[in-house]
Amino acid sequence: MDILKTLEATIEARKSADPDSSWTAKLLSKGPEKCAEKFGEEAIEAIIAAAKNDRENLTYEAADVLYHLLVMLAARDVALDDVLTELARRQGLSGIAEKEARS
Ligand SMILES: N=c1c2ncn([C@@H]3O[C@H](COP(=O)(O)OP(=O)(O)OP(=O)(O)O)[C@@H](O)[C@H]3O)c2ncn1[C@@H]1O[C@H](COP(=O)(O)O)[C@@H](O)[C@H]1O
């Protein structure tokens, strides 16, 4: 998870970088809609790899998906921590649901 936080910080720093100096800065300079579109393209590439059972390519495409997810979140000023907090909240909820099911 540290690697995602480090990547998030790098992406955040690219918001103020020269678009000609970095792929991330260039993508961010095109706006949140373009970042979202790019995320969608990468997700589709991952879907295709999964459907074909191409595990090597799926691993590569999944890394692209995670990177482009972080760029899309940064473009809309959504913090990774907020996403992780939501996941943690859901874990708590599923714990409650399990306890209720058992009682
Ligand atoms: N993890 C990534 C990463 N994954 C994918 N990509 C880029 O995302 C692009 C993938 O999109 P495509 O394959 O569609 O590439 P493309 O055909 O050139 O793009 P289009 O013309 O279709 O828009 C590639 O150009 C990759 O370089 C990434 N670029 C950067 N990072 C990380 O971001 C950090 C900052 O990178 P810079 O912005 O380059 O400094 C790096 O240290 C890396 O850790």
Image (spheres, helix red, strand yellow):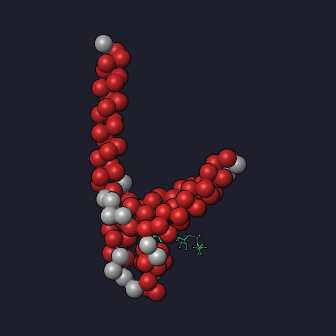
Tell me residue 47's x, y (percent).
Answer: 62, 51
Indicate whether 73 appears above or below 90. below
Indicate whether 41 appears above or below 102. below
Tell me residue 73's x, y (percent).
Answer: 39, 61
Mark yes or no: residue 46 visible: yes
Q: Nearer the viewer, residue 33 or 81?
A: 33
The residue positioned 33% from the left and 59% from the top of the image is: 78
**The N terminus, quarter of image:** bottom left
The residue positioned 29% from the left and 34% from the top of the image is: 92
Mark yes or no: residue 24 visible: no
Horizontal arrangement in the rendering, residue 24 relative to residue 52 (left or right): left
State how many labels appear: 0
**The C terminus, quarter of image:** top left
The residue positioned 29% from the left and 54% from the top of the image is: 81
Horizontal arrangement in the rendering, residue 45 relative to residue 35 (left or right): right
Say which quarter of the image contains residue 95: top left
